[in-house]
Amino acid sequence: MMSNKNTSKTTNHFVGTLKSSLVVLGMLTLFGCSQASESDNAANGSQVEQTADASQNAQGEVTIHTARGDVSVAANPHPVAVYDMTILQNLSALNIPVEGMPGKLLLENLKAPNTPESKDIGTVFEPNLEVLNEMQPKAIFVGSRMAKKYDELSKVAPTFDLTLDTSDMYQATKQQLADLGKLFNKESEAKQLQQNIDDEIAKAKAVTEGKGNALIILVNGNKIAALSDKSRFGFVNKIFNIPAADPNIEDARHGEPVSFEYVQKIDPDWLFVLDRTSAVGQEGDGAEVVLDNPLIHQTKAWKNGHILYLSPDSYLAFGGYYQWMQDTKMIAENFAKASKIDSNSAQ
């Protein structure tokens, strides 16, 4: 009997000890898991914070192309001052508000709808430094007309010269639109706008082949100048594959001065006209009146109704989104109605 009791006590003691050990082991396991979980959470939290910081750093500055090389610009700079109509047109198309812009501009598509009024900061040639200093812009953007004031404006705020490379207008304007989209967090919108331009160009190119050559002229009062296919207006020839009626025109900023006799002698199939007088709002006869004369009447362009007028935007905001859309559609619509020229009968 004593032996059985002792055995029972021993067994009970062993079971009790085992239970205690299991409880302690369970607590240690739970504690360990808890520590691991907290450690994982801390690591994940740190990772998220690092990712967020990296994202913020990535968005802090944006690299854009300028006439003076690639530069870094603080992202989404506001207030912003803009002295160039091409840039203004692109910002308007992207629906980006502009706090400062020149007053009395002649185009209606330079300001995004439903955005606050902009301060009048001068003209596209001369800044109003008093207003500009009061405005305290985060960035100032200039183009060809204001480029000579770059150093002066740089004393007010970081200034960026976005003058376009006119030797390749398409690529230059594509770059500017993409850069502005990137800078103001509108990349997807900029891609869509570029796609709109490219779609219209494709439509135009599909109907220009074999439809004849073109001469591009600038009319300023009673004076005319021929524009080279190497000029900023050479996009008519280069982009739409319309041969130049005279490939020997001197490449000058405002074209090579010519006479009506010259146009009659070249006798282009198409005459593209830039009416500078009307574009800048000057008094005097417009291009339609000036070109309605006996010498121009003798050209194939006049006889066939192939005199096309480029938009005022092509002079004031050349390379802007709306300029591309207007002139490209105009070319497509008119060339679509024309017949191909029989090369054997062409003079």
Image: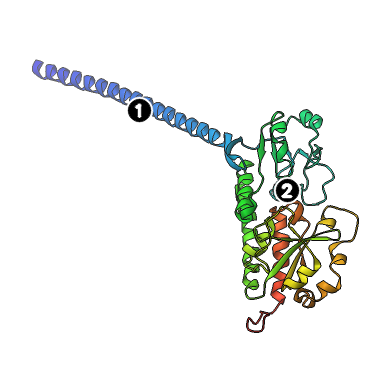
The quarter of the picture where residue 99 lies is: top right
Secondary structure type for disc 2: helix
Q: Which residue is mark 2?
A: 92
Q: Is residue 224 something one can see in this rendering?
A: yes
Q: Nearer the viewer, residue 171 or 11?
A: 171
- The answer to whether residue 321 is above or below residue 342 is above
| Badge count | 2
Q: Residues within 10 Å of mark 2 (few under 14, many from 20)?
A: many
Q: Position of residue 296 (x, y in %)?
A: 81, 72
Amino acid type at circle 1 is Cys
Q: Position of residue 208 (x, y in %)?
A: 65, 72
Amino acid type at circle 2 is Ser
Left/right placement of residue 254 relative to residue 53 reads: right
Q: Position of residue 115 (x, y in %)?
A: 77, 43
Q: Which residue is mark 1?
A: 33
Left/right placement of residue 342 relative to residue 127 reads: left
Q: Quadrant of the C terminus?
A: bottom right
- Which numbered tag is attached to residue 14? none
The colour mode here is rainbow
Q: Quadrant of the N terminus?
A: top left
Secondary structure type for disc 1: helix
Q: Is residue 192 something one can see in this rendering?
A: no
Rounded to the nearest angstrom, the CA distance separating label 2 from label 1 is 57 Å
User: In the rendered structure, which disc, 2 or 1, sits on the residue that comes first in sequence?
Assistant: 1
The quarter of the picture where residue 195 lies is: bottom right
